[in-house]
Image (cartoon, grey):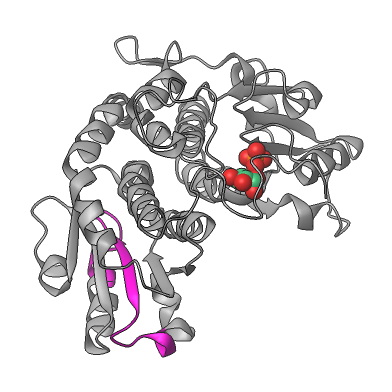
Amino acid sequence: EQIEKGGYEHFMLKEIFEQPKSVHDTMRGRLLVDEGVIKMAGIWDHVEKFKNANRIIIIACGTSWHAGLIGEYLIEEYARIPVEVEYASEFRYRNPIITDKDVVIAISQSGETADTMAALKLAKEKGAFIYGICNVVDSSIARITDAGSYTHAGPEIGVASTKAFTAQLTILTLIAFKLGKHNGNLGNAEFMSLIAELDAIPKKIEDVLNTTHELTQNIAKDFVKATNFLYLGRGYNYPAALEGALKLKEISYIHAEGYPAAEMKHGPIALIDENMPIVIIAPRKGHYDKIVSNVQEIKARKGKIIAVVNKGDRQVSEMADYVIEIPETSECFSPIVASVPLQLLAYYIAVYRGANVDQPRNLAKSVTVE
Ligand code: G6P
């Protein structure tokens, strides 16, 4: 096992550090920047299905569901196809309206999650075209779907999903750009600039790993005794906040809640005092001014602010107690980059609390029963 961990203390840390490579592997052979092409046979062979779809319904559980939420932002923004995202466990029991004009995308790292599988079967029975985004090759979901794309992130052992999540985001980005280019909603110049930026994301992840590894350890030391955490973000980073919170609660057993920053005033703001740590994702592109005012509200209530900002940021950084810098990207890529220090932060808080990060209590890597 020590050999498999490749010198890292836990699989989770190894997998966090693998992300420059795993994201690159997800794009390998698909993203051809020089030719200005995204090659995805699964999409291309059925592109008319997607183009003519009434809507796309994304179903998933856990971390994969968070990826699905970001997929909704991506596909609606770039391909202008309506998207709904549902928990597989809710979808399967609520007698959903599905027709043969719907495309259902299931996202599942393991490809074995019972609820996701059952939801897919239901969608198939009702005539929808079903598409899989799985990491495990030849898994049950990969086999039942009409078509799909593998994430190719390599085996993920840590129960808390890290590299599979960023790989899912990468695939969803490729799908959104490919569909948008095909249906004319994404112009050539923008397409070319976005794919060039996507191609450089693995390098940015590597930079973030280098610049935040020690920093997140230091921050983690101050929060070992925390009992609650809030994670806030807006736009694409709202689901990134949900995922940041999930990582922390899964492995450290600290209660953590993710929220859209603007919704804070409808509830969580009541919880803020000097004992409440708040992670706020505030990159320059994406509702920055609005986030500044959210941070002011937190500051006024003495919340402990851990801000994830772009290099050179001033407004939010000046108010924050802890600052984690990430490189600037177009908004659509920021969840990939912002997730990395949040994974590290959760990891180190859990490690310092003496938790078993690779196998947290009560959780399973793949939930094959209801
Ligand atoms: C379990 C795992 C999570 C995962 C979820 C969905 O709860 O612990 O990490 O996100 O299942 O799994 P899937 O394999 O369908 O992505």
Q: Look at the picture and state if 86 lies above or below 275.
A: above
In the image, 358 versus 302, the foreground residue is 358
Magenta highlight on residue 85: no
Where residue 183 appears, as percent x and y from the top left, is: 53, 29
- The quadrant holding residue 45 is top right
Magenta-highlighted residues: 269-291
Which residue occupies 38% across, 63% down? 234
On the picture, is 80 further left or further right than 48? left
Instruction: Tell how many labels.
Output: 0
Magenta highlight on residue 284: yes
In the image, 365 versus 285, the foreground residue is 365
Where residue 84 appears, as percent x and y from the top left, is: 64, 52
On the picture, is 261 further left or further right than 200? right
Question: Can I make out residue 337 in this image?
Answer: yes
Q: Quadrant of ligand 1?
A: top right
Where residue 349 appears, as percent x and y from the top left, is: 36, 58
In the image, 345 versus 140, the foreground residue is 345
Which residue occupies 64% across, 24% down? 136
Q: Look at the picture and state if 152 lies above or below 185.
A: above
In the image, 54 versus 244, the foreground residue is 244
Question: Can I make out residue 328 in this image?
Answer: no
Where residue 281 appears, as percent x and y from the top left, is: 31, 60
